[in-house]
Image (cartoon, rainbow, N blue to C red):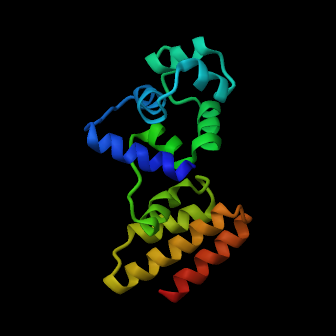
């Protein structure tokens, strides 16, 4: 279901030419346009009071996308939907590109994230870029499987050695 939701978000945002810099406007767009449900129903699904949901949708509930609300959106509609609400950036439609774009969701500050970031920021030739993209796709898949940090680190090293 989450993939269906993000696909619908993509379609409606493009169709209606929506561009919002505010998380709460995207949050309301999700409920009102994408899901087409009432505030009361959405509040029940999220386990919050309808009054709180109303405050969120108008920007009075929080200046930033609350982490607890983000986790609930992730559980219900998927990580990409929550990320879109938080950042306003729609995922690319290519599945491999989706994995590469989302590699930044590795926990900030980990050795794995630092190495990936440093590798991406260096100048890479064409054939090496394809190898790096493939490596990042594999790394992201492992991250989604919730493997430990050392396994991620070893995967990065193996991928870098192939390049």
Q: Between residues 4 and 135, which one lies in front from this camera angle?
A: 4
Query: From what the image shows, is residue 150 above or below residue 19?
Result: below
Q: Quadrant of residue 68?
A: top right
In the visual, does 92 lie left or right of 152?
A: left
Q: Between residues 137 and 50, which one lies in front from this camera angle?
A: 50
> Residue visible at 62% across and 40% down?
76
Query: From what the image shows, is residue 88 above or below residue 104?
Result: above
For residue 153, say whether it is visible: yes
Q: Between residues 122 and 138, which one lies in front from this camera angle?
A: 138
The number of numbered badges drawn on the structure is: 0
> Residue visible at 47% across and 38% down?
86
Find residue 11 and report its horizontal and vertical position in percent: 35, 46
Find residue 158 and report its horizontal and vertical position in percent: 60, 83
> Residue visible at 66% across and 23% down?
44
> Can you name the residue that lies furthest to the top here?
51
Find residue 144 and report its horizontal and vertical position in percent: 64, 61
Q: Quadrant of residue 112?
A: bottom right
In the visual, does 116 lie left or right of 110?
A: left
For residue 61, say whether it is visible: no
Query: From what the image shows, is residue 150 above or below residue 108?
Result: below
Find residue 62 and report its horizontal and vertical position in percent: 52, 20
> Residue visible at 48% across and 14% down?
60
């Amino acid at each position: 279901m989450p993939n269906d939701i993000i696909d619908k978000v993509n379609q409606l945002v493009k169709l209606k030419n929506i561009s919002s810099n505010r998380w709460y406007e995207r949050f309301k767009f999700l409920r009102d346009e994408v899901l087409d449900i009432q505030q009361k129903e959405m509040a029940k699904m999220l386990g919050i009071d309808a009054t709180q949901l109303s405050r969120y949708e108008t920007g009075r509930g929080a200046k930033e996308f609350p982490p607890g609300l983000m986790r609930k959106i992730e559980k219900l509609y998927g990580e990409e939907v929550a990320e879109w609400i938080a950042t306003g950036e729609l995922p690319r439609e290519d599945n491999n590109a989706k994995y590469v774009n989302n590699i930044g969701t590795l926990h900030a500050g980990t050795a794995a994230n630092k190495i990936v970031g440093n590798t991406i920021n260096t100048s890479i030739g064409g054939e090496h870029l394809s190898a790096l993209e493939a490596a990042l796709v594999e790394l992201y898949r492992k991250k989604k499987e919730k493997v430990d940090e050392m396994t991620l680190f070893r995967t990065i090293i193996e991928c870098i050695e192939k390049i």
